[in-house]
Image (cartoon, rainbow, N blue to C red):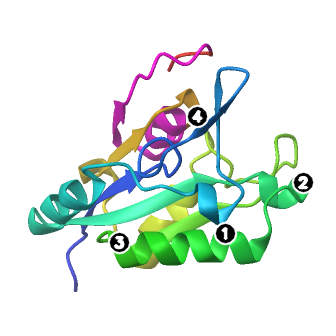
Amino acid sequence: MVSPRRAVFLDRDGVLNRSLFVNDLPQAPTRVEDFEILPGVADALSHLHLAGFLNVVVTNQPELATGELLPAALDEMHKILRESVDLDAIYVCPHKEGDGCTCRKPKPGLLLDAAAQLGIDLKSSVMIGDRWRDVGAGQAAGCRTFFLDYGYPERLP
């Protein structure tokens, strides 16, 4: 039997790549040319891998449901991300608020799916995010959480 693995679950926008801002609120890039990996991310994820953690992205992308983000653009952004940093998996919720899915953070569906598919021990894992939804998903899944507080004018975890 394989022993459960530890993971660092990472929100994408604002944690791994630069968010865009509209009316002082962070927004996901919808064009490949606006997708920029933040400084230090590649080194940080390499260190996490060396420490024995899986690096798993869990990201809400409601712009897919609204048509603001084309699937081909998302695929290209994730190709850039995979080629630039040490990642083990990327899980995406394509739904918008109110769709009733179980994967949209703050629900834990993305983390639960990753845990089941990759053999992850959620209690030994961590969720890192920059919004209350990320922290809520991590807590709901039983992970420790880290909140990157950029001072967004919105609800705090």
Q: Residue at x 48, y 41 (%)?
A: 14
Helix, strand or loop status at disc 2: helix
Three-letter residue code for mark 3: Ser
> Against 131, is 58 above or below?
below
Query: How many residues crowd mark 2 within 10 Å: few (<14), some (14–19), many (20+)?
Result: few
Q: Position of residue 21 (x, y in %)?
A: 64, 31
How crowded is the residue under tag 3: few (<14 C-alpha within 10 Å), some, or many (20+)? few
Question: Element type at marker 3?
Answer: helix
**Residue at position x 38%, y 45% from top?**
127
- Tell me the residue that label 3 is attached to: 84
Marks 2/4: CA–CA distance? 19 Å
Q: Is residue 55 left or right of residue 27?
A: left
Q: Which residue is mark 4?
A: 133
Badge 2 or badge 4: first in the primary sequence: 2
**Residue 87 seen:** no
- What kind of residue is marked 4? Arg
Q: Is residue 151 magenta?
A: yes
Packing grade of label 1 (10 A; few <14, some 14-19, many >=20) is many
Mark 3 to mark 1 CA distance (whole Å): 15 Å
Q: Which residue is mark 1?
A: 74
